[in-house]
Amino acid sequence: PPTRPPTRPPTRPPTFSPTELPSSSPSVPCIEVDSTVYPCGAAINVDFFYEDALPNDWVGIFPCDLERYYHAKVWQWACGSQGCIRTLPAKTNGTLIFDRLPSYNNVGPHRWPVTPYFDLEGNLVNCFQAVYLRADGPSVPPYIDLCASNR
């Protein structure tokens, strides 16, 4: 019997150019403070950017090196006030100024100014960082940290 001619390998589909350019701002959280050292009671400016923000995301000031975030020393809604947490679209970037204790911080162990303190083991805690957070359901800690500033 005659032998069949060899079959051609399948051709690769053409490569098309993307219809949209990739975002120059990746969907990753980012948070920065305006200084690394603050005098007691000085305002703390926190800049944040989070592309996948939700209306009730918030920023808290916590001691450094925590593995879980339970109670911030002071915190603010990322949108800027308690009245905006149901507003859509969510605020994806901005600057929060921590210079007082917001009225909605009156419940809980919150305090202003943020000051050094001794922990239960007698260690001086004088390092704090800003953390962009999201509650996983009702406001019950620990909270989900999405981004933390440098110390």
Image (cartoon, helix red, strand yellow):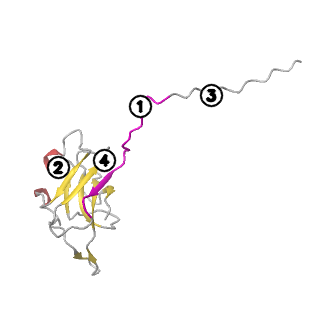
Q: Amino acid at mark 1?
A: Glu
Q: Position of residue 69 (x, y in %)?
A: 29, 62
Residue bearing mark 2: 80
Mark 2 and mark 4 lie on one chain; the one further toward the N terminus is 4
Q: Position of residue 114 (x, y in %)?
A: 18, 68
Q: Secondary structure at mark 2?
A: loop
Q: What span is colored magenta in the figure?
A: 17-35
Q: Amino acid at mark 4?
A: Tyr
How far is mark 2 from mark 4, CA to CA?
Answer: 14 Å
How far is mark 4 from mark 3, CA to CA?
Answer: 39 Å
Mark 4 and mark 1 lie on one chain; the one further toward the N terminus is 1
Q: Position of residue 29 (x, y in %)?
A: 33, 50
Q: Which circle, 4 or 1, is nearer the viewer? A: 1
* Residue 94 seen: yes
Question: Is residue 9 a member of the stretch shown in magenta?
Answer: no
Q: Amino acid at mark 2?
A: Gly
How far is mark 1 from mark 2, CA to CA?
Answer: 33 Å
Within 10 Å of disc 4 (Cα), the crowding (few <14, some 14-19, many 20+) is many
Within 10 Å of disc 2 (Cα), the crowding (few <14, some 14-19, many 20+) is some
Residue bearing mark 4: 50
Q: Secondary structure at mark 4?
A: loop
Residue bearing mark 1: 20
Magenta span dominant secondary structure: loop
How far is mark 2 from mark 3, CA to CA?
Answer: 53 Å
Which of 63 and 104 lies nearest the eye of the viewer?
63
> Which residue is at a point 82% across and 20% down the rendered structure image?
4
